[in-house]
């Protein structure tokens, strides 16, 4: 026990956080750093609501420990927009009116942004394989439509 | 001089003259010279409409937004009658406390039963229309001309003879001082310009940036976090816990007994609270249900299928028993439907601050007024010292109509007065402490004469009543009318078939697992039972399932119209592609007529691929077609998730499924696009969030039979080793 410090780089900023190294990155982001756009859904890396980018790779932050994130570049939904401009995936989400309750959508957007970075023109099958986030409202048709819209823009 | 009560940042300043009993809904507040004001000082034209000097229109929405889009739809209805500029519209929630203090000017807050729009379209439109007339009158007064010479469009009022104009923002202050007109005429839907259009939702932008504050995200200075465990066996109690074992763990502030069945750890962060809670030694008194299992429940329900067992009659004509006894051919089958968890993506949570003489709660709830009543009761304070501040819901599906988590948060906050407490359930707690879709079984019996005409249908449902547990006041002589959703002789959930001899009964068996409203409610099992069995009957006499249904639906033209629409779109009269098979289903629920058709292929008898889904809906009126389409498609995702992956099982008195690894949900790869047909026929207002879910499962099950010749009568498919391809 006692204090433990972790050095995290979140959305381009180096932050020293007083948090135990075995804390899931999700909770360090939400509670110690205070960025709540990254959501808790399951805690067992099943649902994808907590998806962030770790060194550019989409990861479920509930399954990543703070100690494992040390020294890596972490991007949360709050850091996806650059220079005050929304990311093209966020813009497509607005244009295609994708979210219903919206709770899973920040994780969904992070997963899609990572997919499009690696594969700018994904096929439906690419989408099926890469996007495995749960959406209980059932926004999948709009998600797919918005991904293709970004790819074809 | 107005007397003001400042409530909070989201609240309004209310002239006390407005308080009092017996006021009609908010378009008719007898404010006299007193002007009610929003927190920023802008005048309230009436309870629904606040207009700022910059012409921003703030529309109050009493129903909760949980993804279904009714926040936008209700705003469209108000704006339509208000004739305001849609680009200047924003919304806010009134609080239940304010509503109580003002005599419920916003009516019912409850957001369930697909009621958001259909339950309030009339008075919200009157709210908009009344405000428009007052704004026009205020402009006319200023110009000293008759109001009849003025008209309003897009927030601009024009004096027609002279062409003079002014804006809503400029006259709102004067309008707010006027007496509201008593009679207003509403537009014909054919003249709608804002309502009836597929406008974009008003709440999207913040949902794409992480800025939207759900209950789980709410923060107050000095706030502590609580994690909770309730007795894993429903009806059990908390015996003891050993606080000393966790008191020194990092961040732990206190361990609190919550009611007679729960214990919570309060800590600086929720992760610390949860970590300590997991380490806390707890002894439960598991009570009388500790041995109950799905098997014991199933056995008990099966007894209720026997004709000798007492049952409530929900629909009956002719003499089905006698007709079955003398029939040329009898077809019989037994079906069942399991418990289901709503599994909202955002687990249950609420934040409460109890100061000793005042209580505030912030949470997502489908029923603000019920949450308020629960909070008042748990707080020990008078209602006027309490309020509930609603936040956007990370899913509802019926679960957040219950206020158990609100009660817990208030009880914890009451033990830690002056400190805001955010209670958050783990997913495991959420999976195991729900209000579950009730469990039922159903024996279906159909009788044919020698010419293969269906002469009788008997349907005996055995199982759990939701209303008996949650709304006993709505029971009718011990009968739960909601059990017969989709099967009733008439009303908003009427059966779509005329059968000469019909008997539909419910033998009530109420296991200890709490039942609740789960999107679609009893439409889910009832439509599987009836629509699968109609298919069975058709096949039993070698008839086409569509043609067989049509013969029985002549007296139900609206049911038939949606069924015909999906049959035509899916191409029922032409053969499907090689290896693809089709199924159909229809039902009426929540005042709307819906039908679905599916095309699937099956590999090895156990791997299903859904290729196409067509869904038709006649909800009477459509306020936002884009949102209705999303509700219809989402109903298929929710309904097919339950069919393939759902099902909560009981062992040792508790629910076995604890997370999405054991209670899974469909992914994008498994879900085809839903082809939606909206066919509003006018003259009635039906809901759209729920009815379609009824047809999702039976359309696929009927297609599965077409593909394999095997009839599935039990949900979920995972228990029969059937999965998505």
Image: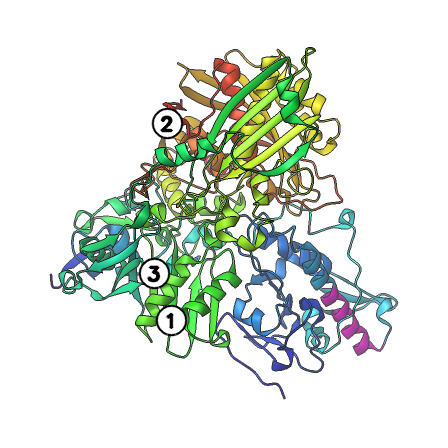
Residue B185, which numbered label?
none
Q: Look at the image and tell me whether residue B565 can be seen.
A: no
Q: Is residue A21 above or below residue B382?
A: above
- Near-viewer residue (B130 or B342): B342
For marks 3 and 1, the one nearer the N-term is 1
Badge 2: chain ID:
B
Q: Where is residue B24 shown, x and y percent of the image?
A: 69, 68
Q: Look at the image and tell me whether residue B71 can be seen.
A: yes
Q: Where is residue B270 shown, x and y percent of the image?
A: 27, 59
The residue at the point 55 percent across, 27 percent down is B613
What kind of secondary structure does the magenta stretch mostly adopt?
helix
B445 sits to left or right of B160: left
Q: Which element type, helix, strand or loop, lies under badge 2?
A: helix
Q: Where is residue A101 shown, x and y percent of the image?
A: 48, 49
B29 sits to left or right of B615: right
Residue B423, which numbered label?
3
Residue B353, which numbered label?
1
What residue sits right under mark 2 in the picture?
B719
Q: Residues within 10 Å of mark 1 (few under 14, many from 20)?
A: many
Q: Quadrant of the C terminus of chain B?
A: top left
Q: Is residue B246 above or below residue B23?
A: above
Q: Residues within 10 Å of mark 3 (few under 14, many from 20)?
A: many
Badge 3: chain ID:
B
Residue farthest bottom in this picture: B1
The residue at the point 25 percent across, 49 percent down is A73
- Near-viewer residue (A123 or B255): B255
Q: Which element type, helix, strand or loop, lies under badge 3?
A: strand
Count how many numbered circles sit on residues in the image. 3
- Near-viewer residue (B74 or A150): B74
């Amino acid at each position: 026990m006692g204090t433990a410090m972790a050095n995290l780089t979140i959305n381009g900023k180096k932050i020293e956080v007083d948090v135990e190294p075995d804390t899931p990155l999700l909770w360090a982001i939400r509670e110690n750093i205070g960025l709540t756009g990254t959501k808790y859904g399951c805690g067992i890396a099943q649902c994808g609501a907590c998806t962030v980018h770790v060194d550019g790779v989409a990861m479920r932050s509930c399954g990543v420990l703070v100690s494992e994130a040390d020294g890596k570049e972490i991007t949360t939904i709050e850091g996806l927009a650059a220079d005050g401009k929304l990311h093209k995936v966020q813009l497509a989400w607005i244009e295609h009116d994708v979210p219903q309750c919206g709770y899973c959508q920040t994780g969904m957007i992070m997963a899609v942004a990572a997919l499009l970075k690696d594969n700018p023109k994904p096929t439906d099958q690419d989408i099926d394989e890469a996007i495995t986030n749960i959406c209980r409202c059932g926004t999948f048709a709009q998600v797919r439509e918005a991904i293709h819209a970004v790819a074809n823009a | 001089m107005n007397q003001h009560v400042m409530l909070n940042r989201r609240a309004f300043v209310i002239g006390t003259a407005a308080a009092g009993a017996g006021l009609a809904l908010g378009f008719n507040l007898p404010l006299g010279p007193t002007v009610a004001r929003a927190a920023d000082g802008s005048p309230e034209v009436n309870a629904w409409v606040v207009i700022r000097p910059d012409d921003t229109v703030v529309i109050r929405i009493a129903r909760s937004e949980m993804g279904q889009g009714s926040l936008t739809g209700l705003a469209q209805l108000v704006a339509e009658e208000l004739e305001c500029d849609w680009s200047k519209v924003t919304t806010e929630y009134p609080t239940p406390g304010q509503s109580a203090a003002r005599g419920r000017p916003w009516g019912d807050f409850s957001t369930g039963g697909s009621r958001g729009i259909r339950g309030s379209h009339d008075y919200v439109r009157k709210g908009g229309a009344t405000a428009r007339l007052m704004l026009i009158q205020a402009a006319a007064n200023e110009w000293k001309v008759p109001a009849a010479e003025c008209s309003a469009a897009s927030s601009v009022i024009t004096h027609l003879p002279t062409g003079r104009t002014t804006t809503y923002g400029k006259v709102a202050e004067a309008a707010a001082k006027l007496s509201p007109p008593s009679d207003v005429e509403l537009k014909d839907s054919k003249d709608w310009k804002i309502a009836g259009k597929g406008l974009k939702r008003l709440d999207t932008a913040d949902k794409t940036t992480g800025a939207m504050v759900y209950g789980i995200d709410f923060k107050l200075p000095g706030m502590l976090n609580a994690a909770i465990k309730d007795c894993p066996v429903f009806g059990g109690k908390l015996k003891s816990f050993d606080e000393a074992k966790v008191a020194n763990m990092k961040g732990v502030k206190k361990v609190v007994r919550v009611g007679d069945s729960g214990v919570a750890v309060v800590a600086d962060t929720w992760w610390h609270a949860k970590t300590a809670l997991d380490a806390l030694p707890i002894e439960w008194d598991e009570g009388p249900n500790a041995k109950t299992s799905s098997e014991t429940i199933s056995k008990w329900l099966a007894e209720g299928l026997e004709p000798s067992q007492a049952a409530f009659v929900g629909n009956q004509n002719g003499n089905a028993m006698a007709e079955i006894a003398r029939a040329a051919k009898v077809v019989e089958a037994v079906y069942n439907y399991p418990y289901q968890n709503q599994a909202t993506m955002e687990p249950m949570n609420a934040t409460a601050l109890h100061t000793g003489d005042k209580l505030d709660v912030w949470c997502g709830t489908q029923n603000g007024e019920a949450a308020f009543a629960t909070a008042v009761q748990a707080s020990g304070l008078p209602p006027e010292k309490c309020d509930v501040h609603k936040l956007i819901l990370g899913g509802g599906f019926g679960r957040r109509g219950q206020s158990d988590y609100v009660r817990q948060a208030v009880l914890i906050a009451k033990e830690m007065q002056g400190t805001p407490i955010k209670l958050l359930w783990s997913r495991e707690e959420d999976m195991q402490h729900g209000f579950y879709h009730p469990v039922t079984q159903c024996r279906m019996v159909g009788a044919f004469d020698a010419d293969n005409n269906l002469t009788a249908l008997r349907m005996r449902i055995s199982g759990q009543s939701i209303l008996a547990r949650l709304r006993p006041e709505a029971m009718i002589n011990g009968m739960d009318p909601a059990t017969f959703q989709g099967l009733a002789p008439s009303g908003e959930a009427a059966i779509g078939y005329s059968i000469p001899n019909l008997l539909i009964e419910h033998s009530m068996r109420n296991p200890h697992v709490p039942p609740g409203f789960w999107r679609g409610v009893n439409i889910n099992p009832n439509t599987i039972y009836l629509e699968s069995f109609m298919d069975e009957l058709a096949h039993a006499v070698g008839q086409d399932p569509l043609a067989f249904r049509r013969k029985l639906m002549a007296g139900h033209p609206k049911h038939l119209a949606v069924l015909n629409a999906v049959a035509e779109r899916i191409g029922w009269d032409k053969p499907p592609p090689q290896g693809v098979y089709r199924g159909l289903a229809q039902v009426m629920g929540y005042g709307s007529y819906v039908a679905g058709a599916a095309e699937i292929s099956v590999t090895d008898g156990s791997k299903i691929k859904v290729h196409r889904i067509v869904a038709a809906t006649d909800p009477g009126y459509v306020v936002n077609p884009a949102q209705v389409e999303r509700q219809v498609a989402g109903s298929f995702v929710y309904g097919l998730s339950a069919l393939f992956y759902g099902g909560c099982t009981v062992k040792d008195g508790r629910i076995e499924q604890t997370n999405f690894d054991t209670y899974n949900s469909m992914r994008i790869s498994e879900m085809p696009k839903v082809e939606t047909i909206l066919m509003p026929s006018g003259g009635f207002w039906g809901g759209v969030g729920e009815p379609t879910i009824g047809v999702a499962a039976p359309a696929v099950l009927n297609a599965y039979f077409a593909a394999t010749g095997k009839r599935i009568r039990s949900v979920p498919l995972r228990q029969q080793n059937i999965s998505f391809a």
